[in-house]
Image (cartoon, rainbow, N blue to C red):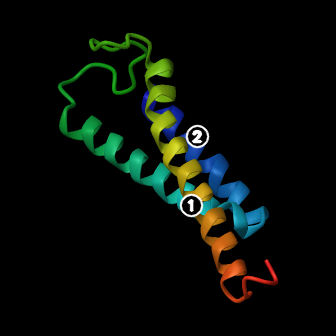
């Protein structure tokens, strides 16, 4: 189920990327989500031993597949948020570079 959660979020962000302003770096977020989806797909294919391909429960620390999918999305969104903050800080420093000390 974590594969479905990731792919649905990648589809939603890709759709938003097509319509939203470029300042939100949704292309970067979309690329990260599609990369995560591909990695999970490869893991599912290589680790498939028969039975259901998409499982609702896991044997790991997080038992619920949907909760696991959300837990996998959290770091991706954190990295995207950090990238937005860095871009905003760089934009501020570029706008003040051309000014003299008396203008600032």
Location of residue 8 with respect to 100 vertically, above or below: above
Q: Which residue is mark 2?
A: 8
Q: How many marks?
A: 2
Which residue sits at x=55%, y=56%? 30
Local crowd size for mark 2, using a 10 Å CA cut-off: few (<14), some (14–19), many (≥20): some
Q: Which mark is residue 86?
A: 1
Query: Furthest-front residue in view?
Result: 102
Where residue 46 appears, as percent x and y from the top left, is 19, 39
Q: Nearer the viewer, mark 1 or mark 2?
A: 1
Q: Is residue 38 left or right of residue 48?
A: right
Residue at point 72%, 55% (across, down): 16
Relative to 88, is 54 above or below? Answer: above
Q: Position of residue 61 (x, y in %)?
A: 31, 12
Near-viewer residue (15 or 85): 85
Which of 41/31 is in front?
A: 31
| Residue for point 49% across, 19% down | 67
Q: Name which of mark 1 and mark 2 comes first in the sequence.
A: 2
Give the camera-side residue of 58 and 32: 32
Give percent across and percent down for residue 62: 37, 14
Please name the residue shown 21% across and 30% down the image: 48
Residue 65 numbered mark, or none: none
Q: Is residue 30 above or below residue 64?
A: below
Packing grade of label 1 (10 A; few <14, some 14-19, many >=20) is few
Q: Where's residue 72, x and y in %?
A: 43, 33
Tag 2's secondary structure? helix
Image quadrant holding the N terminus, namely: top left
Q: Quadrant of the C terminus?
A: bottom right
Q: From the viewer's perspective, is 4 left or right of 54? A: right
Above-or-below relation of 43 to 1: below
Between residue 39 and residue 73, name the one nearer to us.
73
In space, the residues marked 1 and 2 are separated at their CA atoms by 27 Å
SS class of the residue under badge 1? helix
């Amino acid at each position: 189920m974590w594969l479905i959660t990731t792919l649905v979020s990648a589809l939603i962000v890709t759709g938003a990327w097509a319509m939203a302003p470029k300042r939100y770096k949704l292309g970067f977020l979309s690329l990260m989500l599609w990369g995560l989806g591909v990695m999970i797909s490869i893991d599912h294919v290589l680790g498939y031993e028969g039975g259901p391909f998409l499982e609702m429960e896991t044997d790991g620390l997080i038992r619920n597949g949907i909760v696991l999918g959300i837990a996998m999305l959290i770091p991706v969104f954190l990295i995207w948020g950090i990238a937005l903050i860095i871009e905003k800080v760089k934009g501020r420093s570029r706008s003040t570079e051309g000014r003299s000390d008396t203008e600032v």
